Image: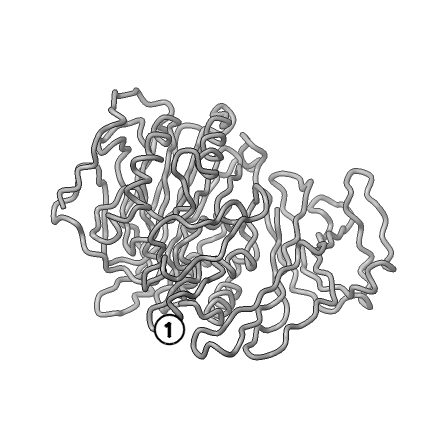
Amino acid sequence: MTVSFSISSACVGRKRQKNKSFGAVRLIGGGGGEDDFLVIGDGNSTKEYDAMSPKSGVERYYSDLYYHIEINDLRPDREYSYECLLLKKDAVSSMQYYLREDRTTLVFNNDDDSIIARSDISSFITPPAPGQWRSSGRTVKFAVIGDLAAKEHSKVTIRHLDRHSDSVDAILFAGDLAYPSKDHVNWDKWMDLMSRRNFFSTIPIQIALGNHDLDTYKNGWVYDVNESVDIALAYENRFQMPQIRPPIRELASMKGFTFEGQPKDFITYEYGNAYYSFTFGPSKHIVLSSFSNFREGSLQYEWLLSELKSVDRSVTPWLIVMLHCPLYTTFKTHRHDIFTTEARAILEPLFVEYTVNFVIAGHVHAYMRTSPVAFSRCNPRGPIHIIQGNGGKSACEPYHNETAEEWVAVRDQSQYGYGTLELFNNSHALWRLIKTGQDENGEVESNLNHLSDEIWVSNQLYAEEIGVSVNQDWEDNS
């Protein structure tokens, strides 16, 4: 479990602040009558960055200090209260601690003289152990959201999610979070918007990399055609996902991106927050980068193949993949991008072979759910593909054809919302689309809380297999 928080206001044109403190997280009572204990971050857990302001090309942006405190050896399925602390660096060595017998973490004596700042007390519930369910008998439930931004519809969506988050165990973001348009102040505004919601400090959040999270948007800005950009600079500093190893990132030429900031080909961005995996009770989650090379022999491909081979479906019967660009789409936009066409050619055979249950994506600002599908044919053993790109940026994508493809179960081009995936047992799950607003005339319908899609899903792992051809062509009809 990683707890992330920031301190001090970001600013433009001001000298970088020196880090004269330690970030820490105090767990209060350990959730079971235990002593308080403190986890202090090291030098690697504190991040900050600066960047050129795109408007003038002269002023620099200086970020907050971001603390990512990794807490190990937490008990599964347990509620912990916690607070985030900023401690004086020169006082840490003199603070009084004692070692717990059953863990290496230090116990905190609450010495206020050593504390620079502290957050409000909040709480979180740890995931069930791999293969286990909630001890209370409650289901395991994920909220799914994509392409959020910080617009009026975005606010309505997250407000609705916040009000209905009591039963949500984790939130899956399918990329394109803040739409910063290369202006890092917009990242701050998005973080402030999210921080005002209770779920942002109480529910684990897992993120897939979106093209707008690369900070390569150039439409409307003055830039040098030969300029190189430090891709995903904010994404790597502001967040910390379960890392395989530290990120490998190379400067990328702006020539390699469209005006909207989407790469024209794969970029050099490996590990870090680009792709990773985690287990949450009865489910195994694999988060991929649509923009890192996933061709055969690449680092991401070989890692993905190893992950798929290692999944024990007797322990985690549900296998969920999340990435930003969809493999299947019924909409006109982005259907010919290599991040979709090559994913169909390279990744779909793996997803079908290893019986992935759900492939969650965003990117397209609309909603779609397929039937279980394999190589463009409905098949009860195939994954269900979901586009949940209607979080708040827009919801107005045109359809590719007036008549939906045979594998499309539900599609919608005008409604905002988010989804929930609720695992009931090893064999059955419930998927819901929650509407939060409509894009007609730009109006926000804050009271629109009804469902437009609800389906019980039988685990494809136990379905009867139908023969399919791996070489089945995608019927584009364009």
**Up-down: is 397 above or below 276?**
below
Q: Which sits in the foreground, 168 or 100?
A: 100
User: Residue most toward the front?
Assistant: 226
- Give the percent coordinates (x, y) of residue 91: 83, 64
- Could you tell whether 17 is left or right of 368 in the image? right
Q: How is the image coloured?
A: one colour
Q: Residue at x 40, y 67 (%)?
A: 181
- Could you tell whether 3 is left or right of 448 in the image? right
Q: Amino acid at mark 1?
A: Trp
- Give the percent coordinates (x, y) of residue 159: 43, 62
Count of numbered tags:
1
Q: Which sits in the foreground, 262 or 6?
A: 262
Q: Which sits in the foreground, 139 or 73?
A: 73
Q: Is residue 434 visible?
A: no
Q: Residue at x 45, y 79 (%)?
A: 56
**Up-down: is 57 above or below 430?**
below
Q: Which sits in the foreground, 418 or 136?
A: 418
Q: Residue at x 40, y 64 (%)?
A: 179
Q: Is residue 7 visible?
A: yes
- Give the percent coordinates (x, y) of residue 113: 82, 68
SS at mark 1?
loop
- Give the percent coordinates (x, y) of residue 240: 57, 52
| Pointer 1 residue | 221
Crowding near the residue tagged with mark 1, few <14, some 14–19, many ≥20 C-alpha atoms within 10 Å = some
